[in-house]
Image: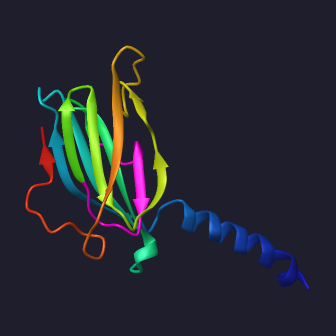
Amino acid sequence: MRFLLIWPLLTAVSLFISSCGLNEKIDVMLECPSPSGKKIATVYRISTGDRPGDQEMKINVRPASSAFDHGMHSFSFRHGYDAVIHWNSDHEIRVEFPASSEITEQEPIIFGTSQTFSSTDTIQMSYQEKPSEHGYFMIEQRCFN
């Protein structure tokens, strides 16, 4: 009887621990500096397992002088494994992503960068779906400025 009372508590604790990112693996795929080199867009993957649904691609924009923080991102998607970054200026960026992707977060404007939050230093974000080969682009260059 006691075990039946403890079981829901054990289940809740194990779900909490598994959702805390203990099994997370972070892979930086590419880093693209802005035209001035003062900002960097980092495309990275967070994996929590081996299945395609266990992977999420994210984009972090930060000052070049700041360390990468995987917890800060402006765009994320699943079921696509690639991205192309186009810096039009230090204040405008376009992200191309596989058309088959499921967008999980999308910000049209970043205030400063993901880590500085400044209302006077905005970055306009635009997004464009592109056809892909199984979620990957068959191109060599992925950073443009």
Q: Is residue 71 above or below residue 139?
A: above
Q: Is residue 108 visible?
A: yes
Nearest the viewer among 3 and 127 is: 127
Q: Quadrant of the N terminus?
A: bottom right
**Range shown magenta:** 68-83
Tag count in the figure?
Answer: 0
Residue 8 location, quadrant: bottom right
Q: Is residue 103 left or right of residue 97?
A: right
Looking at the image, which is closer to me, 34 or 138? 138
> Image point 26% across, 56% down: which residue?
83
Q: Position of residue 19 (x, y in %)?
A: 56, 63
Q: Residue at position x 28%, y 52% from top?
A: 96
Pick the front one: 4 or 33: 33
User: On the picture, is 29 further left or further right than 105?
Assistant: left
List x then y, in percent, for residue 43. Answer: 27, 52
Residue 64 x %, y %: 19, 32
The percent position of residue 62, horizontal first and vertical second, equals: 28, 34
Please say whether residue 74 is one of the residues in the magenta stretch. yes
Q: Is residue 48 visible?
A: no
Q: Nearer the viewer, residue 102 or 4?
A: 102
Q: In which quadrant is the C terminus drawn?
A: top left
Residue 87 shown left or right of residue 103 in the figure? left
Residue at horizontal 9%, vertical 55%? 141
Taking the spot 12% from the left edge, 43% from the top edge, the residue there is: 144
Quadrant hosting residue 86: top left
Give the prevailing secondary structure in the magenta stretch: loop
